[in-house]
Structure formats: structure tokens, C-alpha cells
Amino acid sequence: MPTIRTEPLTAAAFAPFGQVIDTSRPPLGINAGTTQRFHDLARIELAGAGARPLISIFRGQHKSFPVALTVMERHPLGSQAFQPLSNRVFLVSVAPDDNGLPGVPRAFLTAPGQGVNIAMNTWHSPLTALEDVSDFLVVDRGGEGDNLVLVNYPTPYTVVLSV
Amino acid sequence: MPTIRTEPLTAAAFAPFGQVIDTSRPPLGINAGTTQRFHDLARIELAGAGARPLISIFRGQHKSFPVALTVMERHPLGSQAFQPLSNRVFLVSVAPDDNGLPGVPRAFLTAPGQGVNIAMNTWHSPLTALEDVSDFLVVDRGGEGDNLVLVNYPTPYTVVLSV
């Protein structure tokens, strides 16, 4: 199986696929200075009839390295944000589009506290928690229409931890 | 100062003010059974010109009981969801409207893992973390117009921990 090494999740590296949700940019002071607001961290995309934003919690089983990458998915009608509700890291595998199919993947390993917003119609693997079963707050899209495309890689990839 | 005792945060008790975001309802199985989706937990409200949902992180200073409740606010153009990014509890003080002013407050103490979505135009106190400085994922509203009304109670309330 072809092997992909993890890379650190940074805003610049992830930009072709969406946004990193973290506290790395300077905040605004609100609530009479008692709260720092790290403002407007994700571009929420909502397309199609009846589109509306949803808030859900995903509870994902965890995997261990090496992680087999067999199936990719994309949501043609909306973005999907994942924010961990624990301090555990997770794996964000994404891929450019290659004539309607997922291309060669990249595998981003989050730092504790980082989340991601995956852009509309961007290939990504199903949620991949690490270390333990983990909860995530998810902001994605409700409404009419089919918002899920699933494709298997003809040959699965293996994601290994880059140390 | 008049005293308000905390009450546990439950969906039924909080219903006049918004929704509780937690994993108490049965989930859907997704991702070939590897993920449980606790689906569509909050009613996101977005009103006015240019309205769009925002994802931000709030880092809130913490208070200790008894907590003085001096100022209330509301957002006439949108709901505001707060999900803790830690396992710490927080205090959600809300109030019914009383002729355009905040009425007698109620003070909900979350359980670990619970968040809230505060309904559009509902009186609530500024973010009140407990135990330690805490981060929250916040989903609220961007766009044109003035979306913040602040009012001081003529006589502050004191919130005490109900044990």
C-alpha cells in the first residue's frame, strides 16, 4: 500500500482544503475585558434548497497508526466543521479532486485544541479520532438534496505517523 | 442583594431560553457504524441584512460562587451557542423579558460536556466560566446591524450554588 506521512496542521498548509479553528490569531476583547473572542474562524458554506446550519455532536471511535485510508467522502452542498471536545488530537486526511475522484491524500495531525472546517465539496476521510473514543462539535449543513458522495480508493493508502 | 440559587441544566427547564447541546438523545450511526451522530441539537437563528453563521472561540475568565449578576445582554438578530472545549462546568444565567428589560433571572449550572444555544433576543449574562479560564466554541451571527443590547439590573442579583 502507498504510504502517506502525517504533517502538522497549519492554516497555510490546510488552506486548499478549508480553515483551521484555533486560537493562534489575536483575539478581540469583549464582555468588559473578561472574555477574549477569537473571531470568525471558519467559512461556513451552505448551498441548495432549504440549506441551514446544523450543530451536532459526533462521537467517533478511535484508530491507531498506521491508519488505513480506504474511503473518502465529500459534501457537495456544504462545509463541515469539527472541533474536538477533548484535548486529544485527531487525524484529518484530505485530498484534492482528480477528475471527480479523490487524488493523492494528505494527512494532517492536529495539535491539542485545534479543529478544522472542511470546505464544501472537499474530499476527506470519515472522522478519525486517535487515542480514545472522542466527541466533536460539528457544524454542517441541513436541507434538501443529497449531500454525501463516498468513493473508495482503488488501492488504499496507509497513513503513518511522521516523527 | 436578592439571591438566586442554581438549578441543573435540563432541556425541559431551559426550553423557554433555547436548547441544551449534549448527548442525552439517541444518536444516528454514521461512517459505517464508527461514529455516533447526535444530530441537529440547536436551532440556529440568523436575522437581518447580511446574516451569516460564525464560528469563534471564546476564552472566558472564571468566577467563583457567589456570582454577582449585574449586567444582562441579548442579541436581537441571532442565536448564540456556547460549547465548552473542556470538561469544566459553567454558569448560564438567563431571564425572561419584562417590558423590554431583563426580568428575574434563572441560573443554570451545566453538567460536564453540556453546552447551550441561547435563543435570539433572549436575556443572558455574559459568559461565566467556573473553576478556571475556559475555552468555548461559539456559533453566533455575523452581518449588518446592531446585534447587542446591554442592560444593568437596578439591583444586582447574587447567584449561589444550590447543593
Image: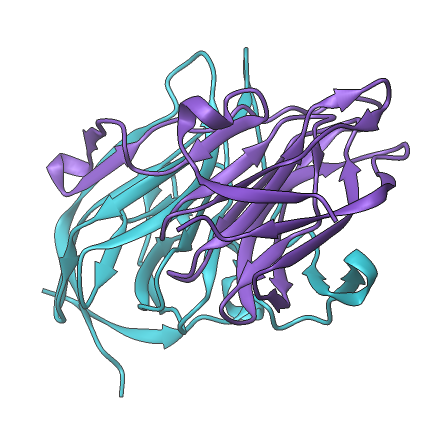
Chain colours: A cyan, B purple
| Residue A47 visible in the displayed image | yes
Residue visible at 30% across and 42% down in the picture: A58
Report x, y in % for residue A36.
Answer: 70, 65
Q: Relative to B126, is B88 on the left or the right?
A: left
The quadrant in which the N terminus of chain A is found is: bottom left
Report x, y in % for residue B41.
Answer: 42, 29
Report x, y in % for residue A10.
Answer: 51, 71
Count of numbered circles on the image? 0
| Residue A54 visible in the displayed image | no
In the rendered view, tell whether residue A16 sits above or below residue A149.
below
Q: Quadrant of residue A92?
A: bottom left
Q: Relative to A75, is B124 on the left or the right?
A: right
Residue visible at 14% across and 71% down in the picture: A65
Residue visible at 74% across and 26% down in the picture: B121
In the rendered view, tell whether residue A64 sits above or below residue A116.
below
Residue visible at 50% across and 28% down in the picture: B14
Report x, y in % for residue A7.
Answer: 37, 75
Q: Quadrant of residue B87?
A: bottom left
Residue farthest to the bottom?
Answer: A163
Q: Quadrant of residue B2?
A: top right
The quadrant in which the C terminus of chain A is found is: bottom left
Q: Nearer the viewer, residue A118 or B88?
A: B88
